[in-house]
Amino acid sequence: MSKPEQDKLRKQFTRKLAIHLRSVREEKGLTQEDLAFKAGINTAYYSHLERGVYSPTMFVIWKIAEALKIDLENFMKGFDY
C-alpha cells in the first residue's frame, strides 16, 4: 500500500473514531471535560480526538473506554471501521 493510500485510510479511521467517541460520550451524558478528567487525559487533547484532529493510541482508547465503563472489546464492537 502506498503512503498516500495509508494516509487516506488513517484519516478515514480517525474521522470515524471521532464520530464514535462523541456518540458514546453523549449517550453516557458526559461532557468532554468530564470524560477527559475520568480518563486522565487533557481536555484539549480529548477535544482534538472528537474533531478527528488527532488519532489516539490504543492505550488512550483503552483509558477512554475504562472511563466510560465499557470494556475495550465492546467499545470497539460499536465502532464501524
Image: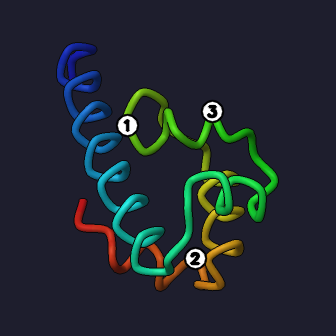
Per the model, the C-alpha gap separating discs 2 and 1 is 21 Å
Q: Which residue is mark 1?
A: 51
Residue 22 placed where, x, y %?
Answer: 39, 59
Instruction: Report the residue at 28% width, 31% height from top.
Output: 11
Q: Which color mode does the image show?
A: rainbow
Q: Which badge, 2 or 1, comes first in the chain's sequence? A: 1
Image height of 78 relative to 12, above or below: below
Q: Secondary structure at mark 3?
A: helix
Instruction: Report the residue at 41% width, 70% height from top.
Output: 26
Q: Dot 3, how many residues are within 10 Å of its Cα: few (below 14), some (14-19), or many (20+)? A: few
Per the model, the C-alpha gap separating discs 3 and 1 is 11 Å
Residue 80 placed where, x, y %?
Answer: 23, 67
Q: Amino acid at mark 1?
A: Arg
Q: Which badge, 3 or 1, comes first in the chain's sequence? A: 3
Per the model, the C-alpha gap separating discs 2 and 3 is 23 Å
Total count of labels: 3
Q: Which badge, 2 or 3, comes first in the chain's sequence? A: 3
- For the residue pair 41 and 58, the one nearer the viewer reads as 41
- For the residue pair 41 and 32, the one nearer the viewer reads as 32
Q: Which residue is mark 3?
A: 44
Q: Dot 2, how many residues are within 10 Å of its Cα: few (below 14), some (14-19), or many (20+)? A: some
Report which quarter residue 79 is drawn in: bottom left
Q: Which residue is mark 2?
A: 72
Q: Amino acid at mark 2?
A: Leu
Q: Which of the two marks, 2 or 3, is nearer to us in this view?
A: 3
Disc 2, disc 3: CB below 8 Å? no
Residue 48 in the figure: left or right of residue 60: left
Q: Which of the two marks, 2 or 1, is nearer to us in this view?
A: 1
Q: Secondary structure at mark 2?
A: helix
